[in-house]
Image (cartoon, grey):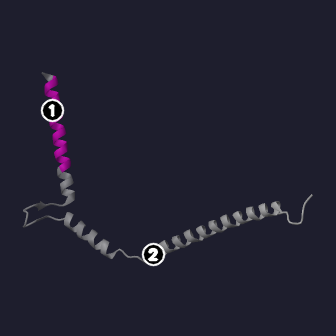
Amino acid sequence: MAKYDDLNTRQIFIIGIASVVVTAVTILAVQYVYFLLVDAHKETLQAQSSYKRQNAVLNDQVGSISKYGADPLTGNVTIPISKAMELVAQESQSESDNHSDNAETKDAT
């Protein structure tokens, strides 16, 4: 027998569960909007950015590795990178030829 001052536990339980669901949906919605705004900001920032300073540094570096020269302070000589790669490849080829010649002479004796 229910009295007039009894609590309606079923109604309290339903309201509690509904509040948890509403809170979770609100949190997810705010997180979704936040990530949309972050992505939009990144796209805007990338669209408005320029790389003039970085491109100038890269052009200076490309220029320094693609010409002959010498450093007067240290006496270091510089050659173009393509020429250096050719010399290294030739040196490697000649070393491998020497090793194969040495192996053939050992096999012959």
Q: Quadrant of the C terminus?
A: top left
Report x, y in % for residue 85: 21, 53
Say if 8 sits above or below 97 in the image: below
Residue in the foreground of this view, choosing between 97 and 30? 30
Say if 11 sits above or below 99 in the image: below
Is 96 within the magenta?
yes
Which quadrant of the structure image shows residue 10?
Answer: bottom right
Q: Which residues are magenta?
A: 88-107
Say which residue label 2 marks: 45
Nearer the viewer's eye, disc 2 or disc 1? Answer: 2
Q: Are marks 2 and 1 in contact (CB under 8 Å)?
A: no
**Chain-order first, disc 2 or disc 1:** 2
Question: Could you tell me which residue is drawn at 50 percent across and 74 percent down?
Answer: 41
Farthest bottom residue? Answer: 48
Say which residue label 1 marks: 101
10 Å crowding of disc 2: few (<14), some (14-19), many (20+): few
Which quadrant of the structure image shows residue 101?
Answer: top left
